[in-house]
Image (tube, rainbow, N blue to C red):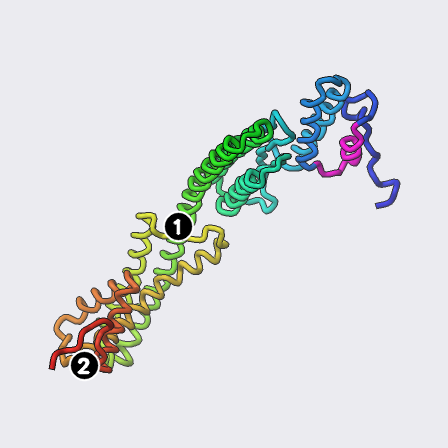
Amino acid sequence: MTTSQRPALLTPADFGWSGPNRYRDFWDLLADPDGRVPFPQIVSAHWETLSRTDRPDLRDEAYAAERAMLRRFESQQGQIQSLYFCERTAGGCVLVERDRADGRGKVCTLFSSMRTSSTDLALLMGQCETILADAASVFGSRKSNQLPRIRWIGDAVYNTATRILRAVDKWHDIQDEKIRERAVADARAVVLATRQGAESLFQRAARFRYFGGVLAGAVLALTVCVAISCLNARLWSATVSTPALAAATVFGVLGAVTSVFRRTATGLLDIDYLTPRLHLRALAALHPAIGAVLGLVSQFALLTALSANQLDARGRPFELFALIGFAAGFSERFATDIIEKAERNLTNTPAAGARPLAR
């Protein structure tokens, strides 16, 4: 860009201030029409409007600069939903809502700044900002039905941030260490409650996506199981029982789906909700395939155990292996027990912890 193409620098008069220029940091920041306005500068300007009670001229100039910076901040960062400032020290937070750069709906962001010697309070404020960042990752979607959840979390985080800033005021105004520690403890409890409420929504959304991936994987796994069973009926039926093979693999898939559904319904399924959606669904789609493999391995293990004990399972093979396959898909521990039992029968090894027979 040449010198002639650069936009002209702005002056305080362009923002409604015709008096002397004594806050050069503020006006120099606003002079560039494309200059980014950091929220800490707005907090500093607001603190000047509060602290300059003995100088109305400085207070009015700081107020004019604050209003100008707020307008530009909103145009750059998004529509301001809520704004809060400390009363005893320079500190504040603002909640903004904007469209995502990738077009996937809207997102709420918290900006904060505080002047305090309490590291704990600063870290707690950082946790609030992290919660909203996680919400943007989990609920970032083109679907409009996610917006109420984003706004609910945004309001909860903003209210929590204001509690932290009130604790900052108390920390600055009161020198009693016990009262300070109590204020920090109260703020920490509020942040924890907000984090738990947000994570409950995050987990619910992640479980829904995970179960959707499991259902998609189940359709694919069942298709493969049927194809393998048809191939077995043509080529290997004399060696491997087709009903047993089909029962073990198909019901292994159904057992895996049922297992995931049970853990989803009871809240026992704990998922890393920050995992990319495509990766999460891909991992979920593997679960039914694993259930089919476990059902198949359990079938062979049980046949081995029955052969070693000279038992016969030819009476009702379909019902037997359907049950075995479902249990194997539903519980990895069950499948492991079946395999270990077959190994013990083959090697004549006693179970762990078992007492040897008396001679």
Three-letter code for the amino acid on which mark 1 is drawn: Arg
Q: Nearer the viewer, residue 213 or 186?
A: 186
Say which element carries label 2: helix
What residue is at 45 percent from the left and 40 percent from the top?
Answer: 192
Say which element carries label 1: helix
Q: Which mark is residue 78?
A: none
What residue is at 41 percent from the left and 43 percent from the top?
Answer: 200
Residue 257 image point, x, y percent: 31, 57
In the rendered structure, the answer to whether residue 342 lies left or right of residue 69 reads left
Residue 354 image point, x, y percent: 20, 73
In the rendered structure, the answer to whether residue 2 lies left or right of residue 290 reads right
Residue 280 image point, x, y percent: 45, 56
Question: Is residue 177 visible from the viewing direction of this image?
Answer: yes
What whole-number distance in Å separates the C-alpha atoms at marks 2 and 1?
Answer: 43 Å
Question: Which of the two marks, 2 or 1, is nearer to us in this view?
Answer: 2
Q: How many marks?
A: 2
| Image quarter in which the C terminus is found | bottom left
Mark 1 — residue?
207
What residue is at 71 percent from the left and 23 percent from the top?
Answer: 63
Residue 178 covered by magenta stretch: no
Mark 2 — residue?
308
Q: Nearer the viewer, residue 57 or 147?
A: 57
Three-letter code for the amino acid on which mark 2 is drawn: Ala
What residue is at 44 percent from the left and 56 percent from the top?
Answer: 281
Tag 1 or tag 2, which sits nearer the N-term? 1
In the rendered structure, the answer to whether residue 299 lies left or right of residue 195 reads left
Q: Nearer the viewer, residue 92 or 140?
A: 92
Q: Are marks 2 and 1 in contact (CB under 8 Å)?
A: no
Q: Which residues are magenta?
A: 23-37
Image height of 20 relative to 96, above or below: above
